[in-house]
Amino acid sequence: MTRSQDATSRGRRFDSLAEAEALAARRLPRAMFRRLNSGAENGVTLAANRAAFQAVTFRPRGAAVHANRSTETTVLGSTVAAPILLGPVGALRLQHPEGAQAAIDAAARFGTICGISPGAGHSIAQLQPAADSALWYQVTTALGGREAAERDIEEATARGYRALVVTIDSGLRPKVAPLKLNARTAVEFAPDLVRHPRWTVGFVRDGMRVSVANTAVGASATGAGRPVEWDDIGWISASWKGPVVIKGVLTREDAQRAVEVGAAAVVVSNHGGLTLDGAPGTLTVLAEVLRAVDGRVEVLLDGGIRSGADAVKAIALGAKAVLVGRAYVMGLAVGGAAGVNRILEIFQDDMQRALAFLGCESVTELGPSHVAAPAEWMS
Ligand SMILES: Cc1cc2nc3c(=O)[nH]c(=O)nc-3n(C[C@H](O)[C@H](O)[C@H](O)COP(=O)(O)O)c2cc1C
């Protein structure tokens, strides 16, 4: 039994993401819950991600329900129980003391890939891969330059991580409502903290770690942090034997560049609306990216996935799989690993139901004929 599995019963308390969100809203201090649900600046891109999924409708097939419907597929050679991956998310320890360890355990139990952010709050050395883990590590120059990134690549290699993620749309501080939670400013939050005693006790027991930086990188880095550059992909690929995933692609230009530098996959992503407000909803540019890469790399997508049906829409439009961010963090906040696992189960169940109505036996049969999307996305 992994250390987080004793939380199983807690994760069963909700049957939908909406319920998990309501529970997370009760459990987390208000400022933290608000921050988690915010986008950069005016939240236009955050909303655009959701609006894009709402603009796609299904084209159901009647009287064609298959008794056994499979959500299993592969992503970069790893078999996943469903094409729903956990994206790299920073500051997880603020949501739940188990942080990224809970994500790793839940993903392994469910059978999917877990992306680890160097800003998650636990260092890569502190995190224990589970027996069936399929882990991706987000390598960055933002927290300590090349030197720190190379140390992380060594750790990722030693620990059997399967791919490196290079997020090209981070490294600059986004303009989001600041969350200044530390021992000094705790006084401001005191009433909020008193109203959320379970969270506060967990936070205090966990040593009140407010830093989002990977502790090992932060402690030992000598190089200055800087945003990642395309030229970095050269030395990253040279010191890493496995596939490299470029995350944060929204244009044909970046998609082509990712192929040229040797990426094995790209993630169509706007960082969940947390970087440049005014960037498009990810689903609206999926066709542009697919055309640009022309089958040479796998294309994944994230941003705004709030149900398994959303995942089905993205896959029908050509994504190999989707990543989730906020949705799984809500489960984490409510019930640690069991809460994350519950979100994955709920999304898988949604997918199976959608497959039934679409007359599909497997998620791999999904294609453009199963959805209707705005014509301008395709042109
Ligand atoms: C609180 C938060 C922290 C994040 N931290 C990172 C990060 O450290 N690295 C990264 O590549 N993406 C990060 N992301 C982006 C996610 O990987 C993912 O792209 C995004 O959450 C998808 O959108 P969704 O939240 O609507 O599912 C973060 C997202 C959130 C909400």
Image (spheres, helix red, strand yellow):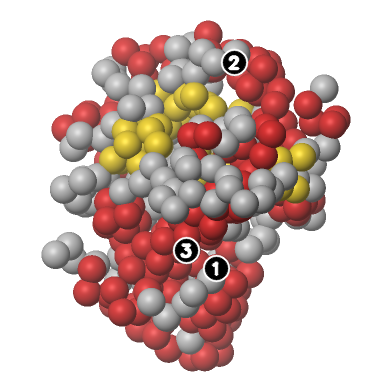
Percent across and percent down for residue 280 are 76, 38
Q: Quadrant of the C terminus?
A: top right
Mark 2 vs mark 1: which is more N-terminal? Answer: 1
Q: Of the residues tagged 3 and 2, which is closer to the observer?
A: 3
Disc 2 marks a residue whose amino acid type is Val
Mark 3 vs mark 2: which is more N-terminal? Answer: 2
Q: Quadrant of residue 248?
A: top right
Percent across and percent down for residue 19 are 55, 76
- 183 above or below 352? below
Q: Quadrant of residue 212?
A: bottom left
| Left/right of residue 335 with respect to residue 253 in the rendered view | left
Number of numbered markers: 3
* CA separation in Å, label 3 and label 1: 8 Å
Q: Which residue is mark 1?
A: 17
**Residue positioned 22% across, 74% down in the render:** 6
| Left/right of residue 141 with respect to residue 272 in the rendered view | left
SS type, badge 2: helix
* CA separation in Å, label 3 and label 2: 32 Å
Q: Which residue is mark 2?
A: 293
Q: Of the residues tagged 3 and 1, which is closer to the observer?
A: 3
Q: Which residue is mark 3?
A: 346
- 156 above or below 38? above
Binning the other alpha carbons within 10 Å of mark 2 as few (below 14), some (14 to 19) or many (20 upward) gives many
- 89 above or below 149? below
The residue lying toward the viewer, choosing from 245 and 145, is: 245
